[in-house]
Amino acid sequence: MAIVGTVECPKCAEPVRTDEVRCGSCGVEVGFTVSSLETDQRDETIVPPAQINFFPGHIFADRFTIIERIGAGGMGVVYKAIDTALNCDVALKLIQPVLAGNASYARRFRDEVRITRQITHPNIGRVHDIGLADGVLYLSMEWIQGETLQALLRQAVTLKESRALEFTEKIAMALEAAHARGVVHRDLKPANVMIDRRGNTFVLDFGLAIQVDDRTTGTKKSKKIGTPLYMSPEQRKSEALDGRSDLYALGLILREMLTGRRSNPEHEDPADLPPEIDSMLRPLLRGLLAEDPADRFASAPDVQREIHRLLEHSAFASATPSESHLSSDAPSRRRAVLWSLAAALLIGATAIGIAMLGSNGESWHPDARVFYDRGMQYLREDAESVRSIDMALQQFNRALNHEPEQPVIHAALAETYWLRYERSRNEAARDEAERAIRKTAELDPELPLLPYVRALGFINEGKFDAAKQQLLLAIDGDPEFAPAWSQLGYVEQHLGNYKEAHAAHEEAIRLAPGNFRAHLYSGVMHEHFAEYTDAARSARKATELKPDSLTAWANLAAAHLHLGNHGQAIEALQQQLELENTPVGRSNLGTVFYELGQYAEAAAEYEIARGLAPDEPVFSGNLGDALLMLKDESGAAAAYARAAELAEERVLREPVNPVALMEAAHYCAQAGRFDCAEQHAAALLDIQPDGPMALLTYSAVQSMIGRDAAALEHLERAVKLGVSKAQIELLPAFDRLRDDPRYIATLSLSD
């Protein structure tokens, strides 16, 4: 029995069942054949064969464990699978045997691997490998949890101008990286753009890409191949192509995001814009959709500059969350008070006196210096958003075009990729950070920045002892390197060393008194040790130095919330939310309402926060707390269950991350899954046997289970290692012990 799947109509790109004769959307007669892929191939109808219909748990090619089928069509099947060689989830595209035996088709997929591997960029989905097993040709690709832009548009029809511009900018950034390698995508369309759950954008499927002979003008002619609705005029005429052909397709995509309607370039002029398109956007669209390539934007960077100009205009101010959830590492009361720092990757002033000269003393190329300085500016001033981090990456890569062997630039790239990874948890960013570190070490193993960027990787992994060793090496190489001192303070606070953490942050502020981040991280240290008045003072100083810092306002609000200053907390949150509608801000506003006993309002804010960042467990957990107070026990149970599920997913991704283990232990306990809670709390203790917060987490779980002796034993150890009375009293897990004499005696030790 044949498997029926879906493929795209070659005319309108709508999904069509493989057993249908005509497209239900446009009525064109369809024949899903090999010839639809290569115009000179023999017409041969394809039906997905039963031998690639695998079930969960099946082992394919002695390497891939099938998890689930994602889609099927006339060309084959796509599965989510575990790649046991790479130890990660992948998207596995299995090609029908009849196509695998076709030399042109097989060459197309090999070319996809070859071409995609040449392009390194956070907005391009990676292809890992290609192979042939049991007559089945396969591609393994980066697994991206999300949906295509095409699917998003089917649900939303149109997008807000700000969101459409942000997607367009990220696609343009991916195109810049491809075009720099002479690669023209040729099949850019919404179905080949993936949006993950954090809003990151990825360009996929370079199977039809070509490499032009001249990266500027393009001289290579090709067959009329691609998706007709998104072809440029020159592509439809089989004329020479360059990167401007992709820009035309990008214009069609932007037009569709704004209007909800596809244009048909074969029967209308896409540059004839509908009246509902804002007048400010018309120059951008016309610059993308000009019939003559010479009248279009010359390059993807030109498109980005125009979008950047538009996004700075108040009419297109973004309402899309760009800041990570960045919750506090310590379990707070209901985990509701969120501090906007997690891995605390401090950016800024990293040149340490060697920006003008290379490590060998030679002067830099002047253009490299310009691009490097621009990258540092993005990091110093705007690194709270993924978009700004990506702009910094772009500038550093441009600097490398002029100074490819300059270790300082590679170190800056490593630092930026670590920050990108911390914000998005995109494994590609992690890989690039490690690659940049290796290149830095190869070029200059004595560079003081090298141990610093290594430390950032250890911090991301929760390996604070290793991070401390590297930071001390960085400081030994340059004692006046303020960011290293701030990171050292952050690491010391995680190790429970109050005096050392305080001294490191004081040194960072002495070295860089005007750097808002130095004060920001000092405030996080004070919060960690429940010194909320000092935390508020530090956060306030950070807002004075940088009034548009989302993180500073969020942290100021959290400090006032801890102090019970609800009015001041609301004022700070209003300042933050005026700058950007972040999930952190919404959640903290919900917590203010919670503290005031306004549980319905709190639940509403937590729901908004969860909608903005659906993969973050803390927002589901907070919602559960509010619903429980509203006597909605079933809703609370569902929210707690979701928080636990998300927290456990994070542990699977980051099994040795203490923050992930703390969250999993806490939310499993809230969901009544005590075996799960104890398992994660014990794993946390294995990693940090003398960690104050690890001991506190384990104690809280034991208390919720009802094992009072174990709870009090570990609580006493936590107190002796520096956990404060305020930190303990914030945890509802200990409510049942409030009148226990042993509990009261333990708390007295922290006074």
Image (spheres, grey):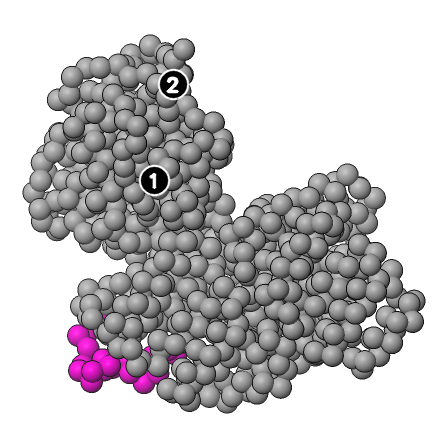
Say which residue appears at 21% left-offset and 45% top-offset: 115
In magenta segment, residue 354: yes
Q: Residues within 10 Å of mark 1 (few under 14, many from 20)?
A: many
The residue indicated by pointer 1 is 140
How many numbered tags mark residues here? 2
**337 sits left or right of 14 in the view:** right
Residues 542 and 505: in front is 505
Please provide percent x and percent y for residue 457.
44, 67
**Magenta region, residue range:** 349-368
**598 sits left or right of 500 in the view:** right
State whether residue 416 is above or below residue 452.
above
Say which residue appears at 16% left-offset and 28% top-offset: 103
Mark 1 or mark 2, which has the lower sequence index?
A: 2
Image quadrant occupied by the C terminus: bottom right
**647 sits left or right of 184 in the view:** right
In magenta segment, residue 692: no
The residue indicated by pointer 2 is 50
Image quadrant occupied by the N terminus: top left
Say which residue appears at 16% left-offset and 49% top-offset: 182
Q: Hey, which quadrant is residue 438 in on the image?
A: bottom left
Dot label at residue 653:
none
- Secondary structure of the residue carrying tag 1 is strand
Q: Which amino acid type is marked by label 1? A: Ser
Q: Residues within 10 Å of mark 2 (few under 14, many from 20)?
A: few
Please provide percent x and percent y for residue 228.
24, 27
State whether residue 246 is above or below residue 260.
below
Please provide percent x and percent y for residue 284.
30, 47
